[in-house]
Image (cartoon, grey):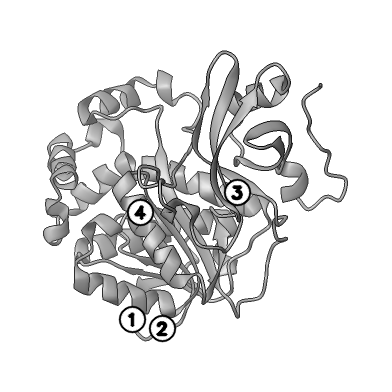
Amino acid sequence: MTWDEIDWAALDRLREGFLSGSAANGPYWRSRSDLASYDFTYGERIGWKWDAVLRELRLRRWMPPPGLLVDWGCGSGIAGRRALSTWGVDAFTGLRVWDHSPHACEFATQAAREAHPELKAAVYADDEPIGLLVLSHVLNELSPAAKVALGSVIERAAAVIWIEPGTSVVSRDLIGWRESLRLTHRIIAPCTHAAQCGLLAAGRERDWCHHFAPAPPGVYADSHWVRFGQRAGIDLRSLPYAHLVLAKNRTPLTSPELPTDAARIIGRPEHFKPYARVLSCDASGVNELTIPRRTCGALYKQLDRTKAPLIYQWQRSGLSVEGATALGEEFLHGRDDRAERRSPD
């Protein structure tokens, strides 16, 4: 697929279906051309979200459990292919895909085989145990019956990586799944804790758990992507997503655990001239913290520039941050000599 081969009419139709909600009414893929055009554009943007989540998991040295890789609700199969590219074919016993559209199942298996000729890929059978289940942008399209079916699939999986659009409604829906699973599963990401989600507390109804993935360098200057963004009404600079990564409690740990006081910033830090403001989530709940520019200048700048996961240990007085340890590559690579990054007094 090239930019000259894209079926723009098909993309317009698909976009309208996603925006109107009619995509939940049944299969909407009409041909391989639909899937190829989607995979090259919308699918690739979703792939950038997967890149961000998988990059963090690799930095944290998290490995998927052995067994089948299953891409459920696969669409063009971008989620399964990104997982294969991250951990390699040898990490799994094979790839299985499922979608309510036979066109999608055929495209996803063929695209995976083209990328990995040695891969054993097929359509998922309902009784097969799952090593890693990947779910991508499915919640908006699930009927009540499909949600029950998905619950059964999750029960057969040793681990799950689930990425959704970063909207308030979908994020809140995903939080509901987290709460229903957190007693039987170990929460890997985005949370730094396994307590009840702090966004369920009174007064937090307008907040939602979402993060932003960086687009690859050069996208903003690429005339093809600029044209696509204009036609689709998409801001190329904004890639919000919600996600949930978990493993069954009986699954062996495959990565170092985060410190018990680790916190994660939700959404984007807000920068004002005298301070930055962040929505910080940890085991104690969700708090709005202030980071003074005068005393925490280095941290103030870092929050505006970093592409790393926004995970920190705060040193604070009340809701004002006095210093912070960034849980970046030093911790994520498991080094014992992790340096504390404090702003000068």
Assign a secondary structure to mark 4.
Answer: helix
Q: Which residue is mark 3?
A: 56
Residue 75 position (above or below residue 129): above
Q: Position of residue 178 (x, y in %)?
A: 44, 64
**Which numbered disc, 3 or 4, marks the residue closer to the eye?**
4
The one nearer the camera, 101 or 270, is 270
Amino acid, disc 4: Arg
**Residue topped by disc 1:** 125
Which residue occupies the foreground of this view, 175 or 150? 175
What quarter of the picture does the N terminus occupy? top left
The residue pinned by badge 2 equals 128
Discs 4, 1 touching: Cβ within 8 Å: no
Q: How much space separates mark 3 and mark 4, taking CA atoms?
A: 22 Å
Q: Which mark lies nearer to you, 2 or 3?
A: 3
Asked if labels 2 and 4 touch by Cβ distance under 8 angstroms, the answer is: no
- Residue type marked 2: Glu
Work out whether mark 2 precedes mark 3 in sequence or the reverse, and give the earlier one: 3
Which mark is first along the chain, 4 or 3? 3
Between disc 4 and disc 1, whose residue precedes?
1
Q: Residue furthest bottom?
A: 127
**Residue 6 located left or right of residue 265:** left
